[in-house]
Amino acid sequence: MTTAPASIVTRSLPYVLVTGGGLGLLAAFLLTVERLRLAADAGYLPTCNLNPIISCGSVMKTEQASLFGFPNPLIGLAAFAVLVTVGAALLAGARFHAWFWYGLQAGVVAGAVFVHWLIFQSLYRIGALCPYCMLVWVATVVVCWYVTLANAEAGRLPRSGVLLRLARYHTVVLVLWTVAVGGLILQRFWSYWIM
């Protein structure tokens, strides 16, 4: 019995998980270090403060930066470490049961929803952008997209037909998302950029 060759999405998923998880883990680690330094010294100027708009310090001091009562980067440290581990296990040949994939799907969707809430908060409530946070945004969305497509290809998601058609254009969807978020950033801070 022969099996159909894996699609580009399925073949790419372990690398996406390791790379996206690794970049997200790095960003979460750097944010945690900056947050600890800021907590120890209220006058500390984070290294990611570049100007009034690109300013981690402005973001870290808000309520949104500790939504659940502790710094958000701690969530990232745990979540991205899991993604790197899953990606590495897949590269080593591991196979997971359907329940595992449903759990991973729920986790990445929750992460993507949280990230989009943070994007809205950064743009329209806080009025500042954190470069490390933006790296987390991208890593989370890319991982969520590829996990969703891989689950659709494996038949683990209901009504996967639309997703399967989009899988042919998997990178186009990510480019469109990036352009949309970039456009929102440009529009929101246009008066600063043109000065």
Image (cartoon, rainbow, N blue to C red):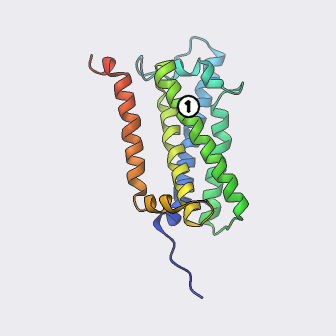
- Please identify the quadrant where the C terminus is shown: top left
Q: Which residue is the site of mark 1?
A: 117
Q: Residue furthest top?
A: 43
Judge by depth and name the residue closer to the eye, 13 or 164: 164
Q: Position of residue 99 (x, y in %)?
A: 73, 59
- Compared to residue 10, the image places residue 21 above or below, namely above
* Left or right placement of residue 131 versus residue 91 in this view: left
Residue in the image at 65% along x and 44% along y? 79
* Left or right placement of residue 133 versus residue 88 in this view: left
Other-residue count near label 1 (Cα within 10 Å), few / some / many at <14 / 14–19 / ≥20: few
- Please identify the quadrant where the N terminus is shown: bottom right
* Residue 113 at least partly seen: yes
Q: Residue furthest front?
A: 159
Residue in the image at 43% along x and 56% along y? 170
Q: Position of residue 69 (x, y in %)?
A: 72, 24
* Left or right placement of residue 117 versus residue 71 in this view: left
Q: Position of residue 63 (x, y in %)?
A: 63, 19
Instruction: Residue type at mark 1: give it.
Output: Trp
Q: Residue furthest left?
A: 194
Residue in the image at 66% along x and 26% along y? 67
Picture quadrant of residue 191: top left
- Compared to residue 109, the image places residue 158 above or below, namely below
Total numbered labels: 1
Residue in the image at 50% along x and 28% along y? 120
* Residue 48 at least partly seen: no
Judge by depth and name the residue closer to the eye, 91 or 105: 105
Secondary structure state at the residue bearing disc 1: helix
